[in-house]
Amino acid sequence: KAGVTQTPRYLIKTRGQQVTLSCSPISGHRSVSWYQQTPGQGLQFLFEYFSETQRNKGNFPGRFSGRQFSNSRSEMNVSTLELGDSALYLCASSLRGLDEQFFGPGTRLTVL
Amino acid sequence: GENVEQHPSTLSVQEGDSAVIKCTYSDSASNYFPWYKQELGKRPQLIIDIRSNVGEKKDQRIAVTLNKTAKHFSLHITETQPEDSAVYFCAAPFGSGNTGKLIFGQGTTLQVKP
């Protein structure tokens, strides 16, 4: 079974731009969660999607948004990028949510 | 609030010794507690998890214990090996229902010296 994939793997943007990251979950998994990983803050929950609906949201500003498609693939968008948005963005998929989450390799976003 | 405290932040042990990492959580409704291992430059991977209906779970050299009354759980690694060196994260779910919202501890960097 193929694992979780994320594209692109690396991104360099400048302040004020926007970015879209993509996550393809394991086949059959309906829950996709997104996390931001930074050296200082660790792994922070962004949001979770289940069956195309946002089920949970973390404490991030409205510049961070996401969506999920009918095939469970998910995208997250960050608008008006700030330097502090530089991080590794990880998505994780699971069957229903409260079970083992399988992480993707992450997208490394650098904001200049 | 939604909080998972993890200690220690760094841990250095000699090969063959045991390592213990402890976490406390704030939501008494949390009922699933995974531990993830993240090697340098790699994605986090689940190494063991425990649900609230059991107090202990073992998998070879790894064990997790849960004390729901005190709201804390611990990871125990016995007979440590250099390949155990990594960052370890505990997590707990927050929110109602079958939520995929995991709040992670700050991580413990484990170094196993040969």
Image (cartoon, helix red, strand yellow):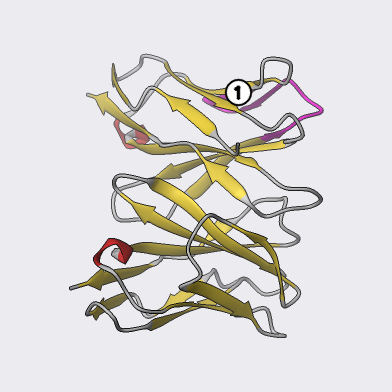
Pick the front one: A58 or B107 = A58
Q: Position of residue B33 (x, y in %)?
A: 64, 36
Q: Quadrant of the N terminus of chain A?
A: bottom right
> Magenta residues?
B50-65
Question: Residue shown at 67%/84% (left/top)?
Answer: A69
Residue B52, magenta (yes or no)? yes
**Does residue A27 appear in this view?**
yes
Pick the front one: B47 or B9 = B9
Question: Residue shown at 56%/56% (left/top)?
Answer: A58
Q: Main secondary structure of the magenta part?
A: strand
Q: Name above or below for residue B24 compared with residue A111.
A: above
Q: Quadrant of the C terminus of chain A?
A: bottom left
Q: Position of residue B54 (x, y in %)?
A: 78, 25
Residue B82 appears left or right of A49: left
> Residue B17 is drawn in which quadrant?
top left
Q: Which residue is mark 1?
A: B73
Dot 1 amino acid type: Phe
Q: Name above or below for residue B103 compared with residue B78.
A: below
Q: Position of residue B91 (x, y in %)?
A: 56, 39
Q: Secondary structure at mark 1?
A: strand
Residue A100, magenta (yes or no)? no
